[in-house]
Image (cartoon, helix red, strand yellow):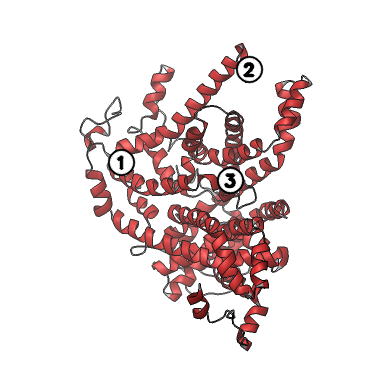
Amino acid sequence: MTEAAVADPVGRKPSLAPPTAFALWCDRNFKWLLVAPAVALIAALSIYPLLFSIWISFVNYDFSIPGHDFVGLKNFRQVVVDPVARWSVVVTAMLSTLDVVAEFLLGLGLALILAQSFRGRGIIMSILIIPLFISPVIVGQLWALLLQRPFGPTDFLLSKLLGFDVTISWLTEAPWNFIALVVADVWQWTPFMLVILLAGLTAIPPHLYEAAELDGVGNWRTFRYITLPYIGPMITLAIAFRLLDSIKLFDTIFMMTGGGPGTNTYTSSFYLYQVGFQQFHLSQATAGSWLFLILTAVIIMGLVRRLLRAEA
Amino acid sequence: MNVGFIGIWSRLGRFVALSLMIIFVLGPLYWVAITSIKPSNDYLAVPPVWFPSQPTLIHYWAALFAYRGLDGLINSVIISVLATLLSAALGTPMAYSLARYNTGGQHLSFWVLSQRFLPPIAVVLPIFLVYRSTGLYDTHIGLIIAYTVFTLPVTVWMMFAYFRQMPRSLEEAAMVDGCTRWQSFVRVAVPLALPGVVAASVFAFIACWTEFFFALVLTSRHAFTLPTVFRAFLGFQGSQYGESSALSIVSLVPSIVLGMLVQKHLVRGLTLGALRG
């Protein structure tokens, strides 16, 4: 303690030595000095690139065409008229909706079960949250392994269960490839919903349920009029978080379908990655990511404001 | 709990539902674990081999050495550890300032939080170009900086919630006793918040450890991390199941173990402190 006090060049020693002008300045601007490094770093890696990318999106920036001439809205037009880009928006919207709905319903069901107290609840919870800590790339790899024909055991198990031969190419055949992607996402992120909704359910004061039971209110009506309104904010929070993350879906696409067959499972992130980093149409990809950013920004704003309100 | 006729049925239903879910969660993990120790000629057996009669570790050696998994592992450790430390070192002061002095009002916290939701694809292209021109491309330091920024919102918001819950009285007492604001922050607030810093850091570490997109775009043959090694297994149908499974196990075990350690902070970690568990 004493050594640290002597070693600290900024801190005023507990003795009565007069503080230097520098120490006083530091003390006055204390709160700004604390945020400065983090803000500077975030600004360097997000504001600067965003500003830089505005410029890129209005010029020619393409590894196959030399020079950086101003091209107006050409880059944006190229993205908007590209049928693959349009399809990728549809795929993104469809997959994220399916993911979030399936995860919410499954997560809510599990949360309702796990909100009861019974033996083994803790260990079951620990098992169910495992997928949250696995890299999405590995989750993609995992499911590719399970679903790939002829190696994966999925078709074999399904044939046994259903009693007839199942020969589905899960990764290369529409609509099974979408189902495969949704299953992988549900596997990884259902626990997310579960954890948040369970936190909401366990916070409901038990006397509400007791009162309902005394009044002879049925299970469904108890759920509808006590449980749902009480966990409403948590539901919004969980859905919004998952929605924003699933819009960025990339890793499992990369590992499971590679966007294929053809461009069938291109999400917006995957499309922009392909255009930017495989075909090196950098300015077109940048223009596209601005359009994508604007599309998502509306949802981001809504959620972040909500979170701030919850915190205040 | 009433143990009537209904009680038994609802218990049975609960048992069945939870069993199915546990099978759904653990099944794929079992399959990848078993594939990682399967001899190659068991891959395509029908019916599938549920447990190999001659388990082998050969795929682990191949994954670590032939596919440079070990290099990826070492890079992942270096990059994740340093980015986590940096994120905690920069994020904790910022969170303290936001929580105690309301610095920058709502705008600053809004801005930091929105970084968490910014689609990586929107910033990665210009970062890639900047990295190419400044020599940061495919370097450890480049990815460390990117990961620090990428985890800062999580650290700041988790610590923000933590400091808010901590009583100010001790810091105020320290200042009455002649400590400067710096001293009361460094000597009083930070030691008290240490459990929170550790929890936030573990979440930041897991986020770095499992990240793929930035690593894919910003590294190549030198600073590549473990998740990017999986690219090597794409497009070779049917020959490297063992290697890719072995590498999956190598990567997922550390993050699951860490995740279990911070399980009680999970609600906070997942919602950036917006909900208390």
Residue at (72%, 63%) from the top-left corner? B106
CA gap between label 3 and label 1 equals 35 Å
Cα gap from disc 2 to disc 3, whole angstroms: 31 Å
Instruction: Check disc 1 and give the amino acid type.
Output: Tyr
Q: Quadrant of the C terminus of chain B?
A: top right
Q: SS for tag 1?
A: helix
**Mark earlier in primary sequence (1, 2):** 2
Closer to the chain start, of discs 2 and 3, is: 2
Residue A113 on image: x %, y %: 59, 28
Type of amino acid at the residue the image marks with label 2: Asn
Say whether residue B251 is visible: yes
- Disc 2: CA contacts within 10 A as few (<14), some (14-19) or many (>=20): few
Residue denoted by label 1: B241
* In this rendering, position of residue A1 left or right of residue A302: left
| Viewer-proximal residue among B142 and A179 | B142
Q: Are marks 2 and 3 on the same chain?
A: yes
Label at residue B267: 3
- What is the number of callouts on the image? 3
Q: Secondary structure at mark 3?
A: helix
Disc 2: which residue: B2
State which mark lies toward you, 2 or 3.
Answer: 2
**Chain under disc 1:** B
Q: Chain of mark 3?
A: B
Q: Which mark, residue B59?
A: none
The kind of residue on which mark 3 rests is Val
